[in-house]
Amino acid sequence: MSSTIRVALPDNSYDLTIAPGLLDRIGAEMSQLKLGKKVLLVSNPAIFKLYGDRALKSLKEAGFDTSYHLIPPGERYKTLNSIQKVYDTAIEKRLERSSTLVALGGGVIGDMTGFAAATWLRGINFVQVPTSLLAMVDASIGGKTGVNHPQGKNLIGAFYQPKWVAIDPNVLETLPSREFRAGMAEVIKYGVIWDVELFEKLEAAKHLDRFRTFDPELLNFILLRSCQAKADVVGKDEKEAGLRAILNYGHTIGHAIESLTGYRSINHGEAVGIGMVAAGEIALALEIWTETEAQRQQELIIKAGLPVKIPANVEVSSILTALELDKKVKGGRVRFILPTRLGEVTMSDRVSPEILLPILQHSNNAFS
């Protein structure tokens, strides 16, 4: 069964396709987009070992002149140095303005490949082939590209939309359980900020923490609803002038935790889970949502096998310092996305240190 969702933008609209077995057809599908013949596929060694040959075979059979570049896995390689190496390969392979970069991997590969595409020759074609749940439902859609700075996550980047997003759910069979859980954090996020029916479907599920026990119909449902939610929000606000900021729910504190742990002990989804719980506690302190809703959110995050406490080795004072460098700071004030009821959130810059500090201190327990 194949589904197509249109990301409708003033310029550069594109489709995302969800279909089992799509990986083996990406070449044929891309040939319909009238792209240039040269394609550079970017991946990491682990993903390439699993799916690289199939992707290259599909591209070559469709007539593309195809090569590849591998980047070591992990957020710590999401740097300008890694982008420089992509540029080096682009020069070696004589990529032109009509050429295409294809991202085969998770959110890190997608972000870096998109940034390389946005900046090489002032912008070349870009296609996303996400292989993680997190990338499928979130990172591959919307055109946010970039790399990390030692002082903070994604501080260097650009908005640059792909020409197409190809989602093959079958590749999730090889996704490590921890990475599957990380993706569930973003799915839960959509339930809180946009789609209460999605939230309730997740609540009714028996298992959320691993692919092998996940109901196939539910998987199809969460892919469709999450991707549609992202497409709807991006379609209304492509470059985060207003509404799109709600997609950062849980990410403000989450990004600080990722940065402070060196992108090693806590992955993105785990950090977002912790950040959503903290945001819920802030909303509770501001009396803009209820104890019952906060509890429902926390129970769902735990059900997905995600942490809810800040790691004990992360100092609260360091989090406060890191928040000052967050991209959402405006006029020197950190802007938080806070829930008002399930399915709705608001933006607030009135979270004082007096409110935030005790919440962070209470959450600063051992990670388990």
Image (cartoon, grey):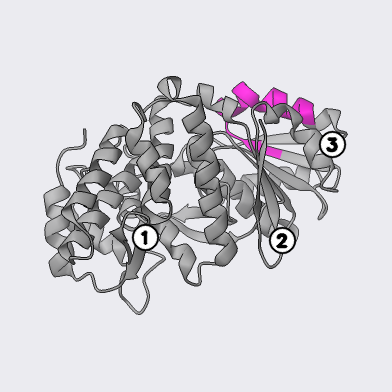
Residue 34 position, x and y percent, is 85, 48
Q: Nearer the viewer, mark 1 or mark 3?
A: 1
For disc 1, the marked residue is 344
Amino acid type at circle 1 is: Glu
Mark 2 or mark 3, which is nearer the start of the sequence? 2
Q: Are marks 2 and 1 in contact (CB under 8 Å)?
A: no
Q: Nearer the viewer, mark 2 or mark 1?
A: 1
Hey, which residue is sitting farthest bottom in the picture?
A: 331
| Element carrying mark 3 | strand
Mark linked to residue 12: 2
Check the picture and name the quadrant holding the C terminus: top left
Residue 247 position, x and y percent, is 44, 57
For disc 3, the marked residue is 65
Residue 178 position, x and y percent, is 38, 29
Amino acid type at circle 3 is: Asp
Q: Is residue 5 magenta?
A: no
Residue at the (29%, 33%) spot, across then down:
303
Judge by depth and name the residue closer to the eye, 250 or 160: 250
Judge by depth and name the residue closer to the eye, 208 or 335: 208
Residue at the (41%, 20%) spot, across then down:
213
Amino acid type at circle 2 is: Asn
Residue at the (70%, 37%) spot, across then down:
41
